[in-house]
Amino acid sequence: MDILYLLSLLCLSLGCLCNLIAGIGIIRFPDFYSRMHAAGISDVTGAGLILIGLMLQSDWSTTLSKLILILLFTLLTSPTISYTLANTAVKAKYKAKAKDNSKWQKDMEAK
Amino acid sequence: MSLAFIHISILCFLLVTVLAIVRMRDLLAVVMLLSIYSLLSACFFVVMDAVDVAFTEAAVGIGISTLLLLSTLALTKRFERPHRTEPVLALFLVLTTGALLVYGTLQMPPFGSASAPAHQHVAAYYIEQSFLDTGIANMVTSVLASYRGYDTLGELMVIFTAGIGVLALLELKTDTKVSRKTEIPAPMAAHHILRIVSKMLIPFILMFALYVQFHGDFGPGGGFQAGVIFSSAIVLYTMVFGLDAALKVISFAWLRFFAALGGLVFGATGVLALVSGKNFLDYHALAEDPIRAQHLGVLLVEVGVGITVAAVIILVFMSFTRQMAENGKA
Amino acid sequence: MNILESFNYWIVMALMMCGLYIMIAQGNLIKKIVGLTIFQTSVFIFYISMAKVTGATAPIIKEGLELYSNPLPHVLILTAIVVGISTTALALALVIRIRQAYGTIEEDEIRAKDRLE
């Protein structure tokens, strides 16, 4: 079989695996900030790997250029979204459910 | 067979999402689940080969609907008050109606069959003849803007009426205690990275809206999707830089003008055909060559639709934002 | 009667009935509007399921492709989506005004306030 086809198969499977792991993480993690961390994995790694897998399957055509643009747009906007969500939670003084919150709380009160 | 697995799993996810919406009391979670429902519907439409519909549902259902619901939530309470009794009568009614509807679907032709009655008569004519009649590759655009152009005019008037309704409800205030020129803070001004990325992306979003507008003849796209994408760029600008900065870019008066202008362009195309002695919205009055006339007519009509949809959605969102600002002061 | 043939339609009926239940049984006005949106979108899914032809492709003419899905329900649903969002926008503006006039958006509290006057 073609090497490009095998590479694209590998990328697509890895992308699906990343999304699955991120989904399990979002359900199983205890509080908001750790869930954000898991969601960030599916936003960038999962979507990026799937897009790269699709790019390897398309020849030099407009489809390839559109996929490259989509990947650039995703890489630009997904971390921004994660940042905005986490920043909003911090500004609303949303407390993390960590075992020992005292140092984090002292940092928050100092700000 | 694998395609059946995909759309059955999407439908099961949809059902689970809706059952979660029924039981939830936190309205913020309900709105987020509704946007997930719209996203899953858009994926389902792609699997069912309805690419134009998926595009519109993704833009409208995930973007605008969620935005307006969240703006309303910001003005009202976040949690729903629980009910005291179990609504048995409603459950009985719903179950009976559901059973009757399922009984009705037992007579339907099997899913995907090419000989179903829905695919005969007019639809077969459109599939065979639309490229020969209009020269437009996207059959949905040719049906929407040329064969059924009158329905699209009515739809444009519906969205225009909704814009007028929102203006009449929210913008006609008789008490002038709060001056309209107070400084309204931007809801998302404190997020610096968001500001920078928005500044980079807004020109490209606007350009993409124009691309979608004029590419509707060759691929999925058209006036509605383009109008929604254009308005989402302006809405992003409003949220990050503030209502005052956005009103300097485009004021309420211009928005009202553009909302009416789109409908005027559409109606004028039709009246032009009437004045030339043909039927209303008969594009053959616009040019000599019939294919060129169809292209010109569809272009004018889609431009009218795009302008009005964009203006109305921006207008509705800015009215809601002004309410939030006045609530914050009062 | 194969389950695969009618599964789409049954799920659509279930979604429609959930939307109807939210609209008639739950008191919060925003939740009712959410129920209306769910009802409308389930009807869209129904129409688009009816438009699909097995083995066909999207209704955009391309060289070498013969079988296309039915474009007419797509046009109808495109119109319906836009009408749905117009209805939602107007309904939400009404909810804002009701909140300003009555101070609440729960249906039974609004009725009680109306009865007092």
Image (cartoon, coloured by chain):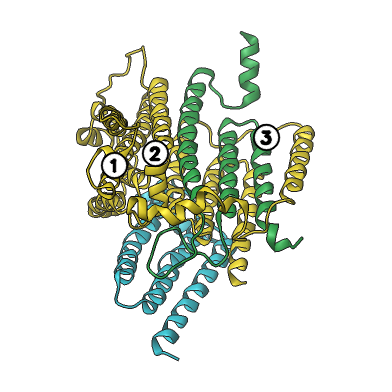
Chain colours: A cyan, B yellow, C green
Q: Mark 3 lies on which chain?
A: B
Q: Which of B231 and C52 is in front in this view?
A: C52
The image quadrant that residue B230 belongs to is: top left
For marks 2 and 1, give the CA distance. Answer: 10 Å
Residue C22 drawn at (x, y percent): 65, 38
- On residue B82, which mark appears? 3
Q: Which residue is drawn at 69% across and 33% down?
A: C25
The residue sitting at 53% across, 21% down in the picture is C103
Label 2: which residue? Answer: B149
Q: In this view, does B18 lie to the left or right of B328?
A: right
Q: Look at discs 3 and 1 and give the one toward the viewer.
A: 1
C-alpha distance separating marks 2 and 3: 47 Å
- The residue pinned by badge 1 equals B297
Label 1 near label 2: C-beta < 8 Å? yes
Vertical position of residue B230 compared to residue A67: above or below: above
Q: Is the residue marked by circle 2 packed among few (<14), some (14-19), or many (20+) residues within 10 Å?
A: many
Q: What residue type is labelled 3?
A: Pro
Whether labels 3 and 1 belong to a single chain: the reply is: yes
What is the crowding at mark 3: few (fewer than 14 residues within 10 Å), some, or many (at least 20)? Answer: few
Quarter that holds the N terminus of chain A: bottom left
- Nearest to N terminus: mark 2 or mark 1: 2
